[in-house]
Structure formats: structure tokens, C-alpha cells
Amino acid sequence: MSESTSLEANLKIRVKSKFNYGGRGTEIDIRDNELILVKKATTEREFNLPVGLYEISAFLGDGKRAAKVIEITPSQVAEVEFEPEFDYQPSHPEDDSKFIMVEGLEQEGGENIKLLVTEDDFTVYPIEDYWIIQHKHAMRKVSVLTCERNEKQIQVSLPISEGHHYSVTCHVKKDLESRHLPVLVNISQNRSIAFCLESMLKSGQVMKAADVASKALETLMEKFVDPTGALLAALILYKTGRISEWEKNLLKGLEKKYGWLPDCKIVLALHLAATHNAEEALRLACEASKERILLTESFSLLLDLLRYWPDAAQNQQRNEALMRLAKIAPLVSWEAMYLTTVTSRV
């Protein structure tokens, strides 16, 4: 029994979350009235503390740091509850038949933004200011949403894969006030692990995300199958230098199983290049350059990898790959998480 619970607890903490094993693995920081850290706990939730004021904080699955100030008194047990504050997302329809192809949508002309019909075979459920997107058939490539606004054509890579709408959808919000990005893409919140990884990446909490990314990678590959969520976990592991031999094997499995998702090739290529396996890294990087990429950061990392490749001038394969990326780069909206290109309508 830990020292803080050997006496009767006078502080009880509860974390309500679908992330970190239902919140049971969420790390808790306890600081005194001078903000000195007096306790850090991962699974422990009951404590015995001296009388005084304390700040209790945790990074939750919404990517934000939540903090509460409480007072420990001699006669009462203080109770603290944390719950992520997610941005609003409308719910999916219970009936899958309400998802329809783009050509079947009734699009209001007054919105000044509309989806264009393309070869992508995803389906759409329009609700409020959102399009909820799903893809039920076998994936052949990264799905791309194409829309038109103010004489501009916007193409956005979508973080979806094949399956039922309870596991692999994304929400696209129409942001008509934005001058640059009229659509905002988020993984649907019912994909709880993938959504939380996305939220932590967007908020810059990469090191916190890395604490769970290895387990998340395995879980999203084998249990709650979610290829784009697994990719986010892999990217986090690469960015934080936490790819051991175990994670390397998972990365290889991810790239092999989901060949339609070029970002998997990119992350594996980056790791192989850093560990002196240049030939295989270059092969994967060049293959990835031929396909539509999901993440803007993957595109940027691939561009840098090829740009600074050793002895590049003599490598035709590398030069051709770099030229393909160079044609796309001027069109990229770099602030978007998911690769977004904007072109003028012809």
C-alpha cells in the first residue's frame, strides 16, 4: 500500500474518459499552494494530504490541461472529478441508409460552398453545419473531399477507412467565416482513442500523447481496427524518438497491411533513414510520393527527407519523387492537419 493511502484518504479523484483505460491510467499532478509538485500519480486515485490548498491537474483526452483548486480540511473528504470538454459534434444517424453519395445531396446555393462529385466512393450525412463522412468499401487510396468556394477548389484528405460508421467516420465542419480554410476536419469522437491522439497532436501535447502511443498503435491495429488512428500513434512515436524494435515491427506491419495509406510508408522510411537503412527508406519514400498523402505533417517530413537526401544529385529516383512533391507544395495549406490543397477554378 502506498504511503498516501496508508492513512484514511482525505482526497478522492475520479477521471471520466474513454482514453487511457477509461481514465484509470491518466496521470495526476498534485501541487501545494506554492505550486510545488508534491505528488504525481498514474493509477492512484485516493490520497492522504496535510491540511491546506492544492492544485489538482491532469491532461485529458481532449488535449487540454484541466486543473482544479481544492482545500483539504481536517473533517471532510475532498472529491475531484475530471471529464474532457470536447467541442460539439452532431451524432451519427442510427440508420446507415441516411448516408448518401455526393451526387444525391441537396446543396443550398446560398451557402457559397458545395461538395463536388468525384471518383471517391465515400458517403455523406449532412447535418447542421457538418458533413459526416464514412467509407464502407475496401480502401484503394486516401479518400479526398473536394469542395468549391469563391472560385477556389479545395481538396482535403480524410482520416477515414472502410467499415461501419461507429468506427471509421470523420466530421467535416463548414467554416464559412474562414478566409483560408472553409472546412475543418476532425476524427469522429466515437473513435475515442484516435480522436484523443488527434486532439493531443493539435494542442501540441506530443509528449503526453507518446505515453500511450505504443499501446494505442497495437490496439488500433489489432483490437479496435482504425488504420488512420494507428498512423497518428506511429507518427507520435517517431516524433518523440520512442520507436523500439517492438514498435518498429508494428510499423512494418502497419505499412504492409495498409498499403493504400502512404503515410505509413513515410513514417517507416523516416525511421529507417535515421537507423542507417537508406536503401529501403528511399524505396518507401519514393513510393509514398506517388500517392495522395493524409497528413500535412507527413507530406512536410517526406519533402524534407528527400530534399536533404545524401548524394541526391545523382539519384534519379529521388529527384523524380521530389519533383512530384514540389508540384503540390505551393498549393498546400500548411496550417491544416490533414493535407489540404487549394487551386483556382479553371
Image (spheres, rainbow, N blue to C red):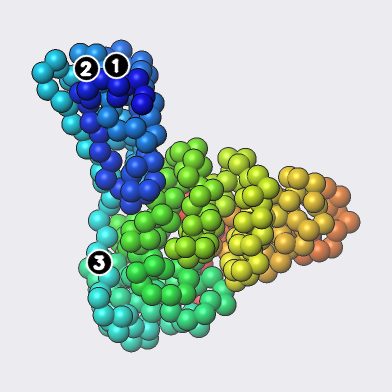
The secondary element bearing badge 1 is classed as: loop
- Mark 3 or mark 1: name the one nearer the start of the chain: 1
Position above or below: 138 against 159: below
Residue 137 visible? The answer is yes
In this view, the residue farthest toward the bottom is: 104
- Mark 3 or mark 2: name the one nearer the start of the chain: 2
Q: Residues within 10 Å of mark 2 (few under 14, many from 20)?
A: some
Q: Which residue lies at the image location 68% right of the left edge and 48% below the top edge?
A: 245
Amino acid type assigned to the residue bearing label 1 in the image: Asp
- Mark 1 or mark 2: name the one nearer the start of the chain: 1
Residue 149 visible? The answer is no
Residue 287 place in picture, x, y as percent: 71, 66
Q: Give yes or no for contact between labels 3 and 2 (Cβ–Cβ under 8 Å).
A: no
Quadrant assignment, res 136: bottom left
Side of 140 where 98 appears, left or right? left
Q: Which mark is residue 32?
A: 1
Q: Which residue lies at the image location 27% right of the left edge and 60% below the top edge?
A: 89
Q: Which residue is mark 2?
A: 53
